[in-house]
């Protein structure tokens, strides 16, 4: 099941449902090897990213899992600057964000993550929002905190589990 929504505005960003057509520009956005120090792997080629986006756009093969993916477009320049994603299953949304190196330090990840967390709570009524952050990635931890998540003592694949249980 996939979930596409209309473009979703924040003050400086448009959040657009991920499309295969975004792959080439996003390959450039995500091309800095330093970006992958904490998120792992290496930059994808446009072809590899296109194949990945085709899989994501097709939706999860598990009917009980919803994949939600958006690209972040900077309003002033029209450039793509990053992505946010949520995997929704069994009342939980696992969220993630990434902003290309040239656009980091401008608050875009925080702006997008705040929107994402609010959106999954409102749209899907999830009982828990989770993010996993590398212990050394202080900027991403600050984004998680700004989005309302709190670090737990749990580690998952070497990353700290951050969590928010919305009040009803």
Image (cartoon, rainbow, N blue to C red):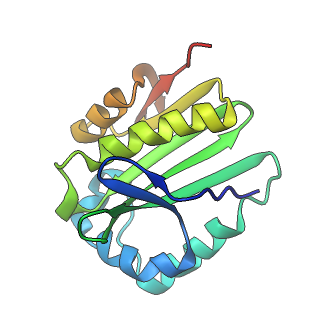
Tell me if 2 is positioned left or right of 108 in this view.
right
Residue 4 visible to an observer of this rendering: yes
Vertical order, 130 against 74 (above or below): above
Between residues 134 and 82, which one lies in front from this camera angle?
82
Which residue is at 21% across, 59% downward?
Answer: 103
Between residues 156 and 87, which one lies in front from this camera angle?
87
Tell me if 32 is positioned left or right of 165 in this view.
left
Q: Give the image location of residue 166, x and y in percent.
A: 56, 19
Which residue is at 67% across, 29% downward?
Answer: 125
Residue 157 visible to an observer of this rendering: no
Q: Give the image location of residue 139, x and y in percent.
A: 23, 40
Q: Give the image location of residue 109, x and y in percent.
A: 31, 47
Tell me if 151 is positioned left or right of 89 in this view.
left
Q: Quadrant of residue 58?
A: bottom right
> In which quadrant of the rendered image does the C terminus lie?
top right
> In which quadrant of the rendered image does the N terminus lie?
bottom right
Q: Give the image location of residue 95, x and y in percent.
A: 51, 42
Which residue is at 25% across, 68% downward?
Answer: 33
Which residue is at 30% across, 62% downward?
Answer: 74
Between residues 69 and 30, which one lies in front from this camera angle?
69
Residue at the extreme right of the image, as rendered: 63
Vertical order, 155 against 30 (above or below): above
Residue at the extreme bottom of the image, as rendered: 47
Q: How many marks?
A: 0
Residue at the extreme top of the image, as rendered: 167
């Amino acid at each position: 099941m996939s979930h596409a929504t209309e473009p979703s505005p924040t003050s400086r960003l448009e959040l657009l449902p991920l499309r295969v057509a975004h792959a080439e520009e996003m390959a450039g956005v995500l091309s800095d090897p330093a970006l992958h120090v904490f998120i792992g792997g290496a930059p994808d080629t446009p072809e590899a990213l296109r194949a990945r986006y085709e899989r994501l756009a097709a939706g999860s093969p598990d009917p009980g899992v919803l994949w939600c993916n958006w690209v972040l477009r900077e309003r002033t320049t029209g450039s793509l600057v990053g992505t946010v994603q949520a995997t929704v299953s069994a009342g939980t949304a696992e969220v993630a964000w990434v902003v290309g190196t040239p656009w980091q330090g401008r608050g875009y990840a925080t702006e997008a993550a705040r929107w994402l967390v609010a959106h999954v709570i409102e749209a899907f009524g999830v009982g828990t929002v989770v993010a996993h952050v590398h212990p050394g990635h202080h900027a991403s931890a600050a984004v998680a905190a700004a989005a309302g998540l709190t670090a737990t003592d749990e580690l998952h694949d070497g990353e700290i589990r951050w969590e928010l249980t919305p009040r009803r």
